[in-house]
């Protein structure tokens, strides 16, 4: 599977955003994560009245994918107003599985697709190898 953001992946993120449960922030986010197998998993943000329990769209998509047996990913599209990059928590969680992930950013109202690597978003990442150092 190539690292491009094909139209299907972008559309899947746009469609997933329609399911966002965001009554508190009003900020709807959709994601579409592509496994190396080619399968696509979508997610939306799911908020809660206990705000800290909110789950971002990216982690919803990732959890769905991992729970269905996927653990290697090549691309994610995130769709939200202003085409923001994933939050820090999502960067870390995505990095756990695919440091080489390519992140595409789209605004629901625009055609343009931004592109950035996860390593650009999370330089000097903490990962499993960091745990091998002990004192
Ligand atoms: N949100 C995401 O879904 N992904 C991110 O990477 C950043 C933020 C959601 C969480 C919350 O429901 C809303 O956007 C406002 O923070």
Image: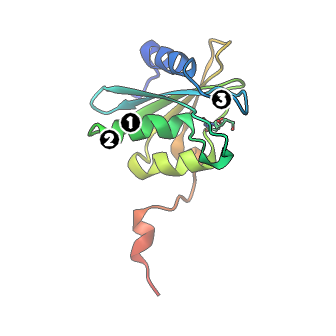
**Residue annotated with mark 2:** 67
Q: Position of residue 122 (x, y in %)?
A: 57, 51
Q: Where, by quadrant of the figure, is residue 114 drawn?
A: top right
Which residue is at a point 38% across and 36% down the rendered structure image? 64
Q: Position of residue 127 (x, y in %)?
A: 45, 61
- Under circle 2, the secondary element is helix
Mark 3–mark 1 Cα distance, whole angstroms, equals 19 Å
Q: Nearer the viewer, residue 118 or 41?
A: 41
Query: 29 left or right of 68?
Result: right
Which residue is at a point 45% across and 39% down the rendered structure image? 101
User: What is the basis of the colouring in this image?
Assistant: rainbow
Earlier-in-chain disc, 2 versus 3: 3
Query: 91 left or right of 84?
Result: left
One can see residue 122 in this view: yes
Quadrant holding the N terminus: top left
Q: Position of residue 79 (x, y in %)?
A: 59, 24
Mark 2–mark 1 Cα distance, whole angstroms, equals 5 Å
Whether pointer 2 and pointer 1 mark residues with C-beta atoms closer than 8 Å, the reply is yes
**Residue annotated with mark 1:** 64
Mark 3 vs ligand 1: CB below 8 Å: yes
Query: 106 left or right of 12?
Result: right
The residue sitting at the bottom extreme is 135
One can see residue 72 in this view: no
Which residue is at a point 67% across and 45% down the rendered structure image? 51
- State whether residue 32 is above or below residue 8: below
The number of discs equals 3
Whether pointer 3 and pointer 1 mark residues with C-beta atoms closer than 8 Å, the reply is no
Q: Residues within 10 Å of mark 2 (few under 14, many from 20)?
A: few
**Residue annotated with mark 3:** 22
Which residue is at a point 27% across and 30% down the rendered structure image? 37
Earlier-in-chain disc, 3 versus 1: 3
């Amino acid at each position: 599977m190539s690292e491009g953001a094909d139209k299907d992946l972008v559309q899947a993120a746009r469609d997933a955003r329609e399911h966002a449960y965001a009554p508190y922030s009003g900020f709807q986010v959709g994601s579409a994560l592509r496994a190396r197998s080619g399968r696509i998993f979508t997610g939306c943000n799911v908020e809660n009245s206990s705000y800290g329990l909110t789950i971002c769209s990216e982690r919803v998509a990732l959890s769905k994918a991992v729970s269905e047996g996927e653990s290697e990913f090549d691309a994610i599209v995130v769709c939200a107003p202003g085409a923001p990059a994933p939050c820090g928590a999502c960067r870390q969680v995505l990095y756990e599985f695919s440091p080489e992930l390519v992140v595409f950013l789209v605004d629901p109202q625009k055609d343009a697709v931004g592109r950035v690597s996860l390593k650009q978003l999370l330089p000097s990442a903490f990962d499993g190898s960091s745990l091998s150092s002990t004192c």
